[in-house]
Image (cartoon, rainbow, N blue to C red):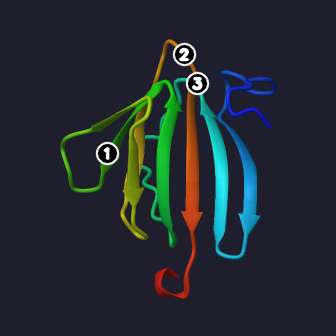
Amino acid sequence: MNLFDLSGSGIDKEKFDTLLSKDNVTIERIISHAQSTPEGEWYDQTWDEWVIVIEGKAGLLFFGEEDVITLNKGDSIFLPAHQKHRVEWTDLEEPTIWLAVHIRSEANT
């Protein structure tokens, strides 16, 4: 798979592709087209996640914070288990391509 191949993605919803899943690690490619987390909803995952934006840009907000963190191409962030967060916005001009590494362990279940 080519990480930059946009075939099969559309502007109406995000596309999720599992690239590797082994033991406690899953690597996923996400393609966003101006999507955001629905108003009032928060991700509260039971696993750690590291994400990098490899194309486009996005804004993340942590629960209880006021400032949105802007992630540009090449920026990454670590999201520990139970760190409530939401995607405030993704690029309106071009697709945002994320690479997400999900790490599950007994300590964060």
Residue nearest the viewer, comparing 104 with 109 = 104
**What residue is disc 1 on?**
61
Q: Give the residue at x 65% y 43%.
A: 29
Q: Amino acid at mark 1?
A: Leu
Q: Is residue 25 above or below residue 36?
A: below
Q: Amino acid at mark 2?
A: Glu
Q: Quadrant of the N terminus?
A: top right
* Residue 16 location, quadrant: top right
The tag on residue 73 is none
Label 3 element class: loop
Which of pointers 3 and 2 indicates the residue nearer the eye?
A: 2
Q: Is residue 40 visible?
A: no
Label 1 element class: strand
The tag on residue 94 is 2
Q: Is residue 33 visible?
A: yes
Q: Residues within 10 Å of mark 1 (few under 14, many from 20)?
A: some
**Residue 14 picture location, percent across and down:** 65, 35
Mark 1 vs 2, N-terminal side: 1
**What residue is disc 3 on?**
33
Q: Is residue 2 above or below residue 77?
A: above
Q: Give the residue at x 20% y 40%.
A: 67
Please report contact status of discs 1 and 2: CB closer than 8 Å, yes or no: no
**Residue 107 picture location, percent across and down:** 47, 86
